[in-house]
Amino acid sequence: MTGQTGAMVLTGRAGRALAAGYVSRLACVDDAATMAALHVDVWRATYTGVMRQEVLDALDPVAAAERWRNFMGSAAWDRTVWVGVDPQGEVVAMASAGPARDDDAPTHHELRAINVSPRAQGSGLADLMMRDLVGDDPAYLWVVESNARAIAFYARHGFIAHDRRWDESCGVHELRMVR
């Protein structure tokens, strides 16, 4: 199913991403700084005016890169992380999934993040990464309730709103979506 090998023919948005030269691949420790900077940029572009500004201002790509390097190099690492690469070879997306973290998890697998640079949004890369990371397996995720674009994306992949919570630290409501 991987976009990296191209061994499976993909259709739809994911197929269009491959045809345009985008690929998804497993992340490595050397991707940590790029993934951290990407995460900060995507969150600031997406959540300014939605989340508490102090949360966005406190995002530190240098510290986040160090955390990614430590996590990815640890024997206790329990996630799968993919990066999306544009036709020029630049990492423009990252996604992660792993075991459920919630005590009341509706499935054993949690999609933890898909972050795509604004310049690669609409390319089909997120669809390709979703296929490589989660496939059609049962999973759940939390998404900021006001992020209509992300909610529509997940709904297209079969996720439905299950319940909601208040994230005090970010000052937003989140929806739990389940497939």
Image (cartoon, grey):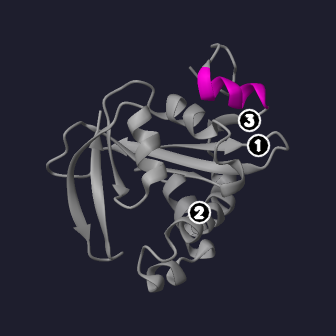
- Decide: is 74 above or below 82: below
Residues 53 and 129: in front is 53
| x and y percentages locating residue 123 in the rendered image | 68, 39
Secondary element type, mark 3 = loop
Q: Which residue is mark 2?
A: 42
Q: Is residue 65 magenta?
A: no
What's under tag 2, amino acid-wise?
Val
* Span shown in magenta: 12-20
Q: Which mark is residue 22?
A: 3
Where residue 4 appears, as percent x and y from the top left, is 68, 28
Residue 43 vs residue 108, the one in the foreground: 43
Report the disc number at residue 156. none
Instruction: Answer with mark 2 or mark 3, whichever residue precedes in sequence.
Output: 3
At a point 65% along the width and 36% down the height, the residue shown is 24
Residue 51, given in percent of the width and then of the height, sits at 42, 75
Ranked by sequence position, the earlier of labels 3 and 1 is 3
Is there a contact, CB below 8 Å, between mark 2 and mark 3? Answer: no
Disc 1 target residue: 86
Label 3 Cα neighbours within 10 Å, binned few <14 / some 14-19 / many ≥20: many
Please state, as top left, top right, bottom left or bottom right, where the N terminus lies in the image. top right
- Nearer to the camera, 95 or 33: 95
The amino acid at mark 3 is: Tyr
Total tally of numbered discs in the picture: 3
Mark 3 and mark 1 in contact? Answer it, CB < 8 Å.
yes
Q: CA distance from mark 2 to mark 3?
A: 18 Å
Question: From mark 2 to mark 1, how far is it between C-alphas?
Answer: 16 Å
Q: Residue at x 43, y 73 (%)?
A: 50
Dot 2 or dot 1, earlier in sequence:
2
Res. 18 visible in picture: yes
Magenta stretch contains residue 15: yes
